[in-house]
Image (cartoon, rainbow, N blue to C red):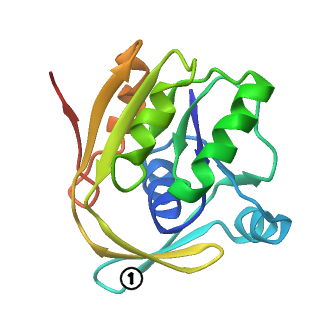
Amino acid sequence: MDVVIVGAGSVGLLFGSYLSESGLGVTMVVRREEQARKLNNYGIRRVNEDGSESIFRVHATTAFPTDNAVWIIAVKYIDLQQFLVQLDSLQIKNPMLFIQNGLDHFGMANATSIPNLAFATVEHGARRLDDNSVQHNGVGLVTIGAGRGDSTVFDIIENANSDRFPVTRHVN
């Protein structure tokens, strides 16, 4: 199974780089064709904490894919409601992991009919440098907590677990 990341800001690019590095196929959904072209042509450039750089291949698009993939939602809260309306109109029901800052997205996401839903906190320091580059400033922890449905569909995210990208699951 592959991963779709909606949003290519600092957190989306950071996730995309580490999930691609772990061997997963990553599709980035972005707003602008220019950013999609840059990601498709050059990949995600990650500037690591030690100053070294790594490049990771991803596929980028401005359209929502219809394949069977786990989606990671990394859009800003201000854009979340419009995103959820689009999902509903397209009847997309893929498993979704929401990783926005704060908890305001929790109620909105829970009000959807998405059958497999989870939430995550992200403690990494990351800064978007440009359309395809992210600087990883500080190692933190990604903690996944279940929302509803089959939480095992999110196991693939844990495959990216490493010393520089620790991922854990909160167990009830």
Which residue is farthest right?
Answer: 33
Assess disc 1: are there few (<14), some (14-19) or many (≥20) residues with their C-alpha within 10 Å of its C-alpha. Answer: few
Pick whichever, 22 or 136, lies toward us.
136
Coordinates of residue 45 in the picture (x, y in percent): 55, 73
Q: Does the image show residue 60?
A: yes
Three-letter code, disc 1? Ser
Quadrant in the picture for residue 30? bottom right
Up-down relation of residue 143 to residue 55 (above or below): above
Which residue is farthest bottom?
Answer: 51
Quadrant in the picture for residue 127? bottom left
Please name the residue that numbered disc 1 is placed on: 52
Coordinates of residue 42 in the picture (x, y in percent): 70, 71
Pick whichever, 100 or 72, lies toward us.
100
Q: Does the image show residue 6?
A: no
Q: Which residue is drawn at 36% across and 36% down?
A: 119
Left or right: residue 167 compared with residue 22: left
Q: Residue at x 35, y 24 (%)?
A: 147
* Local secondary structure at mark 1: loop
Pick whichever, 18 or 65, lies toward us.
65
Coordinates of residue 46 in the picture (x, y in percent): 47, 73
Coordinates of residue 122 in the picture (x, y in percent): 30, 55
Task: Locate the C terminus by quadrant.
Answer: top left
